[in-house]
Structure formats: C-alpha cells, structure tokens
Amino acid sequence: MAQQAPAEQFAYVDSVALNLHGFYSGLERLFELIARQVDRSLPVSETWHRDLLQQMTQDIPDTRPAVISQKNADAIDEFRRFRHLVRNVYAIDLAPEKMAGLMNTLPDMWPNLRAELLAFADYLSALDASLN
C-alpha cells in the first residue's frame, strides 16, 4: 500500500476498498441478470450470494453453458467475502494486506474472466440470432 500520512493512508485504503467492492458488485449484478433472464432461477437462501456464484459455474442443459469456470468463481468468491467486510466494518478496520492480495489477483484473473464473459455474450448473441 502507499506509504502516506495516516489521513492519506485512510483515504487510500477506503478508495481501494470501494473499488474492489464495486468490481465484485458489478459482476454480481451481471450474474443476477443472467440468473433472472436466462436461467429463470435466482437463489433465495441466506447464502444466495455464494449460491449465485456457483450457479454461474454450472452448465444448465437446454438453457445455457457455464458462464464462468470454477477457478474464476473461486477467485471471485474472495471478492465476495471482501465485499461483505466492506459493508459491515469501518474502513479504518480494513486490512490493507487483504486488499493487496485481491489487487494482486486481478491482473491474472481478469483476462481469463473477461474472455469467459465475452464468450457467454457471444453465446447469447448466437442464440438470439437463431431465434430471430
């Protein structure tokens, strides 16, 4: 993390936390949309966030292929857990080391995750073309 004065360090940690939170939240919104519109099934249990992520790894016969790999789901799950922390603790209590681990994960994870999401978008486009 940046070597800064305490006030600047707090602002930096807070900013990084919100960006990591936003990254996961954006993925979750996308997965919710897929679950509602394509699968017609959104998890409703207390663990629905985790269940939704696992749902995206499943190939659903006659509906859709898996959206993401289990490897990417496992990596995304770390962001899901962190999002929970961001929503439930004060920024001053966040562990910069945990955020550094997530930030280091992104450059390796993103290209493959992006490719999986684009492949799924291509699947939806092909499906739409075949129906029209």
Image: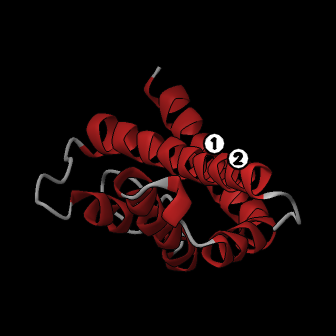
- Quick check: 110 left or right of 23? right
Residue under label 2, please give it.
Answer: 11
Q: Position of residue 55 (x, y in %)?
A: 32, 63
Residue at the image position 63 percent from the left and 42 percent from the top:
122
User: Would you place residue 33 above or below residue 63 in this image?
Assistant: above
Residue type (three-letter) at the residue carrying disc 2: Ala
Quarter of image, res 22? top right
State the SS at label 1: helix
Looking at this rendering, what residue extends furthest in the front direction?
6
Residue 74 visible here = yes
Residue 123 visible here = no
Instruction: Using the image as rendered, state which of residue 128 and residue 46 is in the foreground.
Output: 46
| Residue 122: mark in rendering | 1
Instruction: Using the image as rendered, state which of residue 28 and residue 60 is in the foreground.
Output: 28
Q: How is the image coloured?
A: secondary structure
- Quick check: 111 left or right of 58? right
Instruction: Using the image as rendered, state which of residue 13 and residue 35 is in the foreground.
Output: 13
Q: Position of residue 25 (x, y in %)?
A: 48, 45
User: Would you place residue 78 above or below residue 6 in this image?
Assistant: below
Q: Position of residue 42 (x, y in %)?
A: 21, 47
State the SS at label 2: helix
Residue at the image position 68 percent from the left and 56 percent from the top:
13
Looking at this rendering, what residue extends furthest in the top direction?
132
